[in-house]
Image (cartoon, rainbow, N blue to C red):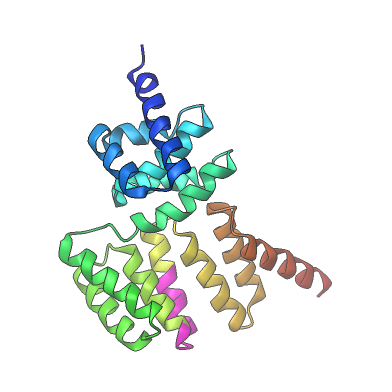
């Protein structure tokens, strides 16, 4: 008998208790004690949608960037619940990359952007990129800071590089689209937004932009 079938109901039980009580710390503890990331990755491909939801949520909690492709594929799962959990969880994985110091630097860049300290974010992200150019989120975060400073060409280059490293980075694709819009390049914007939607069909604001741009270009 497949071991995954034996384990799946246990994980689902943890998940149902999490839904009932919304206690993520208990869910995290239970999953960490019983499951490895490799087992959770296998459960993401199970036929039962509740099991897939539970596995995606668990990977979001205990996984790291090595599970990026698994959650990236879950973004287009046939179940809307799986897609939604994956969209939220994968962004957490993007920051769980590298060693402890690199993760701390990346988290600080995120906080600088959240605090609208964009010049500082650019400086720290640039330093991190020089040291670890394979960290896609560092490029994306610098692109975000460049976007808010009106440096759209630099932002596009950074987001493009983020996508080269991490082909599931839907926020980088959407960011490119916004930059192209502000450069009055609707054709390139439409292409970028379509790419973002192919990666994450749940981005409703991006979908609305696609519809608007398609209508506008058709009229022209």
SS assignment for the magenta stretch, majority: helix
From the viewer's perspective, tell me whether residue 66 is left or right of residue 43: left
- x, y percent for residue 201: 59, 52
- Of residue 55 and residue 143, the one placed in the foreground of this image is 55
Find the residue positioned furthest to the top.
Answer: 1
> Which quadrant holds residue 57?
top left
Count the labels in the image: 0
Give coordinates of residue 94: x percent, y percent.
Answer: 35, 58
Magenta span includes 155:
yes
Looking at the image, residue 136 sits to the left or right of residue 172; the answer is left
Instruction: Indicate the position of residue 13 as horizontal and vertical percent values.
Output: 41, 30
As drawn, 38 above or below 173: above
**Residue 141: in magenta span:** no
Q: In this view, does 85 lie above or below 119?
A: above
Comparing 176 with 98, the one in front is 98
Q: Quadrant of the N terminus?
A: top left
Q: Where is residue 153 in the image (x, y as percent from the top left)?
A: 47, 82
The one nearer the camera, 183 or 5, is 5
Tell which residue pokes out farthest to the right in this image. Answer: 219
Residue drawn at the location 51% of the way across and 42% of the way down? 82
Q: Is 117 placed above or below 56 here?
A: below
Query: Residue visible at 55% across and 43% down?
Result: 81
Stretch of the chain drawn in magenta: 148-159
Please identify the quadrant where the C terminus is shown: bottom right
User: Image quadrant of residue 166?
Assistant: bottom left
What's the residue at 48%, 53% (across, down)?
A: 87
Choose top left, top right, bottom left or bottom right for residue 192: bottom right
């Amino acid at each position: 008998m497949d071991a995954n079938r034996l384990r799946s109901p246990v994980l689902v039980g943890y998940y149902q208790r999490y839904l009932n009580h919304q206690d993520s710390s208990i869910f995290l503890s239970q999953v960490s004690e019983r499951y490895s990331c490799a087992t959770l990755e296998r459960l993401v491909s199970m036929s039962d949608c509740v099991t897939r939801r539970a596995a995606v949520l668990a990977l979001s909690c205990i996984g790291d960037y090595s599970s990026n492709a698994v959650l990236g594929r879950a973004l287009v799962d046939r179940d809307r619940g799986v897609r939604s959990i994956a969209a939220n969880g994968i962004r957490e994985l993007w920051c769980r990359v590298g060693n402890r110091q690199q993760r701390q630097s990346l988290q600080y860049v995120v906080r600088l952007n959240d605090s609208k300290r964009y010049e500082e974010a650019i400086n720290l992200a640039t330093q991190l990129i020089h040291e670890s150019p394979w960290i896609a989120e560092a490029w994306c975060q610098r692109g975000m800071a460049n976007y808010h400073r009106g440096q759209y060409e630099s932002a596009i280059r950074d987001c493009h590089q983020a996508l080269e490293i991490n082909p599931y980075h839907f926020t980088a694709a959407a960011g490119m689209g916004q930059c192209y819009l502000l450069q009055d390049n609707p054709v390139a914007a439409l292409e970028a937004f379509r790419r973002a939607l192919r990666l994450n069909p749940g981005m409703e604001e991006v979908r609305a932009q696609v519809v608007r741009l398609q209508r506008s270009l058709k009229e022209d």
